[in-house]
Amino acid sequence: MTKTLIRGAQVFVENDNFAEVSLLIDKDQIAAILPKSETVADAKPFDATGRIIIPGLVNGHTHSHGALARGGVPDDAILETFLAGSAWLNLDRSHDDLALCAQLSAVELIRKGCTSCFDLFIELPGPTVEGTYAVAHAYHDVGLRAVVAPMIADQTIYQALPGLLDTFEGPLREAVAAITLPDWRSTLAVCDQALRNWPVPTGRVRPGLGPTIPLHCSDAFLQACAHLSDDISMPLQTHLAETRLQQVMAQRKFGTSLGEHLSELGVLSPRFSGAHGVWLSEAEMTLLAAAEAGISHNPMSNLRLGSGIAPLRRLADAGVAMGIGTDASNTSDGQNMFEAMRLATTLSRVNTSDSEQWVRTTEAFDMATRGSARLLGFDSVGQIALGWAADLVFLDQSYCHYTPQRTTLDQIVMAETGAAVREVMIAGQMVFSDDRILTLDEAALRQRALVAADRITHANVGARTMNAAAAEVVKGFCQRHCTAHLP
Ligand SMILES: [Zn+2]
């Protein structure tokens, strides 16, 4: 029996209204939305009395490798000192470690009501086919819907930021200058091979491409990434204007803003999304909208690293396709899409009491579901509607957030933390129930994580010391340049 009839719940239908209806699930889809009294002879009944069912949240931007880097980022880190100071956390990672990270990340996301993610994972010094496939298999086996995008670059931060290397002296300068990344042609050849010959069904886990930060990628590299994304028709995501310093450096390096630079290179397209977009000008927003490109808004990470508050209202009004993400569990410091969604609406209120300018709860919810799904390239994910993916989150109506229950969506967006999540279904398969992930052994996973984290910490004592010293120099450089004039 492949059909399930979910009965008794309040269902958020088409991201529009709550109704007491039954959901007929056939394989991985919502096959019918039926009156609550209706029965279906060939369907297994599922009693969801006391549940509020919403579509699974979709994480527009994360990094699974952050799962083994928790607690490794100093609380005074800005993005650039994080990049310089925390590089050691990504060293000495086996393919098993990459898979372990994807499993850890998937478990956290599912437990917090997220059913899909865009994962820019890193493998150093460069991606391999085996490493990429280890991540893809991990998501496939846990059951989380995902875009798996190798995060790639051909310039280190010391090569990427004009003038940075010159501020280093002595042995530390030699040490950071000696760090190199593989030539972009070999990196892209690996991606081409890995992403074209995908190892798992693409219904749930798909390939993507993640040129990390435009400043860290040569022009020809970015253009080649865009061609590959076009050729295989897969999403491409980069960190775009995450910090003000990035825009200052873009002016020095390219003589233009980051958005205009990408536009001139022909990288913007409906498959393109930028993560963060905190420091985008109106002109850049217009270019993104004209290209039908998107932005993943990652408010927690932006706050944690002091990057700023993205102009969500203006981005949405400009016509940029908006999604919401968490960023990784090293800089966020968890992956909670409920939190990200709540920050999306509440932070829009910071600078204005004109409520017409606020991002309302309905908008934030839509960005965190259909909006992010659009960035991932999944057309039928992100709402409970006929023929759409059976990605469902069951909330406990008796939980304090809903006692009393008046304006259900407002209460979900403004109060939910994931604490009321009781069941999670992805592509018609129950993956979480009775406070347990059903597709893997969480206790064993935790043991593997502790062993791997311990090994990484002990293997990289020297790199950690060097990274910390380099981060201090980077910090001074950023302080001197981050407030420079921008046109
Ligand atoms: Zn990121």
Image (spheres, rainbow, N blue to C red):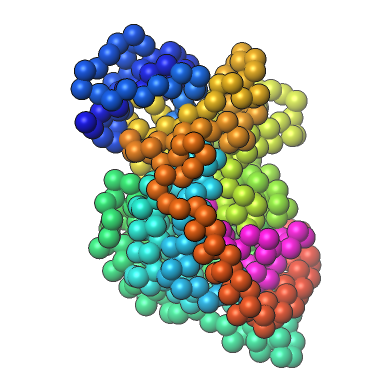
What is the x, y in percent for residue 308?
Answer: 70, 48
What residue is shown at x 21% (from left), y 31% (from top)?
1
Task: Classify 393 as above or below 93.
Answer: above
Left or right position of 402 against 469: left
What is the x, y in percent for residue 253?
Answer: 59, 69
Left or right position of 407 against 123: right
What residue is shown at x 74% (from left), y 63% (from top)?
74
- Furthest residue in direction top, as rendered: 37
Kindly tell me whether residue 411 is visible in this rendering: no
What is the x, y in percent for residue 14?
Answer: 41, 23
Task: Classify 28 as above or below 103.
Answer: above
Left or right position of 208 against 86: left
What is the x, y in percent for residue 482?
Answer: 74, 61
Kindly tell me whether residue 68 is visible in this rendering: yes
Q: What is the quadrant of the C terminus in the image?
A: bottom right
Report the label total: 0
What residue is shown at x 50% (from left), y 52% (from top)?
442
Left or right position of 5 against 315: left
Q: Quadrant of residue 352?
A: top right
Task: Classify 391 as above or below 272.
Answer: above
What residue is shown at x 64% (from left), y 44% (from top)?
299
Q: Nearer the viewer, residue 270 or 380?
A: 380
Highlighted range, magenta: 58-87
Q: Nearer the viewer, residue 376 or 241?
A: 376
Task: Classify 87 as above or below 399.
Answer: below
Residue 182 lies within the magenta run: no
